[in-house]
Amino acid sequence: MNAPATSVAATSAVRFAGVVKHFGAVKAVDGVDLSIAAGEFFAMLGPSGSGKTTCLRLIAGFEQPDGGHIEIFGETVEGLPPYRRAVNTVFQDYALFPHLTVGENVAYGLRVRGVGRAAREAAAREALGLVKLAGMEGRKPSQLSGGQRQRVALARALVLRPKVLLLDEPLGALDLKLREEMQVELKGLQRALGLTFVFVTHDQGEALSMADRVAVFNEGRIVQVGPPEQVYECPATRFVAEFVGSANVLSAGEAAALGAPARAASLRPEKIGLLAPGEAAAAGVAALEAAVVDVSYQGPVRRITVRTASGHAIAAVVPAARTVDVGPGAQVRLAVPLAALHPMEGER
Amino acid sequence: MTRPSLALKIAALGGLAFLHVPLGFILLYCFTTEERSYAFPPPGFTLKWFGVVWGRADIWAAVGLSLQVACLATAIALVLGTLAAGALARARFFGREPVSLLFVLPIALPGIVTGIALRQAFGLMDMPFSFWTIVLGHATFCIVVVYNNAVARLRRLSPSLIEASMDLGADAFQTFRLVILPNVGTALLAGGMLAFALSFDEVIVTTFTAGQQSTLPIWMLSELIRPRQRPVTNVVAVLVIAVTFLPILAAYYLTREGEAVAGSGK
């Protein structure tokens, strides 16, 4: 049903223009412009209360905007109830119907559309095969594990061949190993089906690893949109720098002191190295004297928090093997490559 | 696991006996030959009171009236109680707490207050006392029972189930029929049966809202004052026990199963 991306190149899968949504006095969504391409895996990333979930619910139709305009594949959807939109949602708590079997859950959307029993059962079987749950039709949701319920919720949405699939914190309730497995699987499904996936998460790792593009939300607005590499490497504002991968933020003065242009800049902790005693900094690398405040061992790396002479705290992530002799109180010299300092447009 | 002490066992048995032995006496005096007083032991045994009951038109009229009132009051309560529960289970609006308190008030108030209030209200509105005033009176407290059951179940239902249903293409009516009703059905059944039972044996509100009609409980009260044919009331009481026991048992098992289904969705 969904047209190949080439024929709708001009049409966005989802388009927001100046969308506003209030809850009482709270501006949950405060003038969001957004364009999601057909076939894209799009992540909406932000802390809780940043408006990302409200945006998802605006696409699904659970909320109606107070201002602005929303289109899904060129069709204006304001005022359309959820059951008249060609989008489906995978809910955070999965929202499986407890009184129905897995097969009946997956077939539910077809049932309310008046599809015959045989046809909808066949479609449900096929969709369950897609998410590797073949043969589970007769179980009740209560008999499944969390990961399996997630797959049922996915099959239940996919069986309707939606133009856009919405996922609300899809991996939030799963344990780490399952989460990594599902990340790979979701990405594979999205590529195989060529569908537009829009997912909401507060986990930057999830957003960076799965999405084609990431929109970072803060206080009801989008602060940056771009491919994961760009959002991670070149954060536009202090908020993005600190929220995505907790980068260091240097003021204009501190940047200038290192020999970089006098502009506020972000600096990724893993770009910072340690200089051995007496070792000279290479060209284009500034040496920075600092006292170690804290060292935390994280397996392959250590995260070292230091305080510079000017009282600024900086975090560095260095290979664990290099730092065995560094403890709190020690004086170290950091190697800061000037090329790793990214001036932030959004900051003075 | 500690074993209960002998004293506790005796106390428990005593409590149970206190609750249920009187029911045994009701049964026993169905068969007595003495019609003016309940002498123990009964002087003799007879089945003639069952025949007497069978032949008394006033008893069957009272039973019929009580059944009709209970059915109608329960039906009204099921519709209004469910709607009220739907409105109050989740929504947040100004005055929500006072409104839900007002809903539960009729069952907390002494029946005599409800009765007088209704009687005066009907009087002010120039409504003649009739079958319908009894039904309205009963509906006031039947709604509470249905509302309480439905609201508790609705609150345990995940709100995203309803959103999921709409998301998958079901309109409001389909969502109600396919998702909400199957999940609150047993709660409504239990609430409905309780409402029916409450209405069926209600005396106080009925006294104030009935005209010339007498429901079964009213008939029984008036019969107790008469000196003759006392065992007739016993026979009627035993029949009522027999008829109400089965649905109550059914409701108990049905709702127990419902708990398991609703709880397992978590």
Image (spheres, coloured by chain):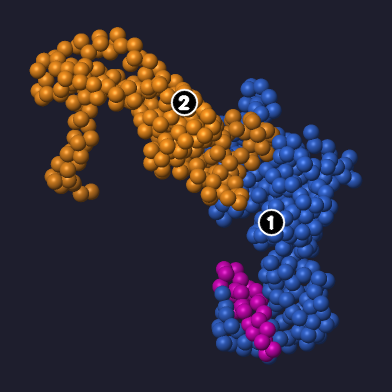
As drawn, B6 above or below A50: above
Q: From the viewer's perspective, tell me whether residue A131 is left or right of residue A145.
A: right
Chain letter, disc 1 residue: A
Q: Which residue is mark 1?
A: A24
Instruction: Tell me where residue B244 sits by quadrant.
Output: top left
Q: Is residue B127 magenta?
A: no
Q: Which residue is at a point 78% across and 87% down the rendered structure image?
A: A257
As drawn, A173 above or below A194: below
Q: Which residue is at a point 70% across and 52% down the rendered structure image?
A: A54
Neighbours of disc 1 within 10 Å: few (<14), some (14-19), many (20+):
few
- SS at badge 2: loop
Q: Which residue is at a point 61% across and 39% down the rendered structure image?
A: B162
As drawn, A15 above or below B41: below
Instruction: Tell me where residue A234 sits by quadrant.
Output: bottom right
- State which mark lies toward you, 1 or 2: 2
Q: Is residue A309 magenta?
A: yes
Q: Which residue is mark 2?
A: B129
Q: From the viewer's perspective, tell me whether residue B114 is left or right of residue A252.
A: left
Instruction: Tell me where residue A317 sits by quadrant.
Output: bottom right
Q: Which residue is at a point 82% across and 51% down the rendered structure image?
A: A68
Type of amino acid at the residue the image marks with label 1: Gly
Whether labels 1 and 2 belong to a single chain: the reply is: no
**Which residues are drawn in magenta?**
A297-323
Distance of label 1 from label 2 (alpha carbons): 49 Å
User: Which color has been applied to chain A in this rendered view?
Assistant: blue
Q: Nearer the viewer, residue A254 or A24?
A: A24
User: Which color has been applied to chain B in this rendered view?
Assistant: orange
Position in image of residue B106 (x %, y %): 45, 40
Type of amino acid at the residue the image marks with label 2: Phe
Position in image of residue B215 (x %, y %): 38, 23
Position in image of residue B147 (x %, y %): 49, 38
Q: Nearer the viewer, residue B228 or A318?
A: B228
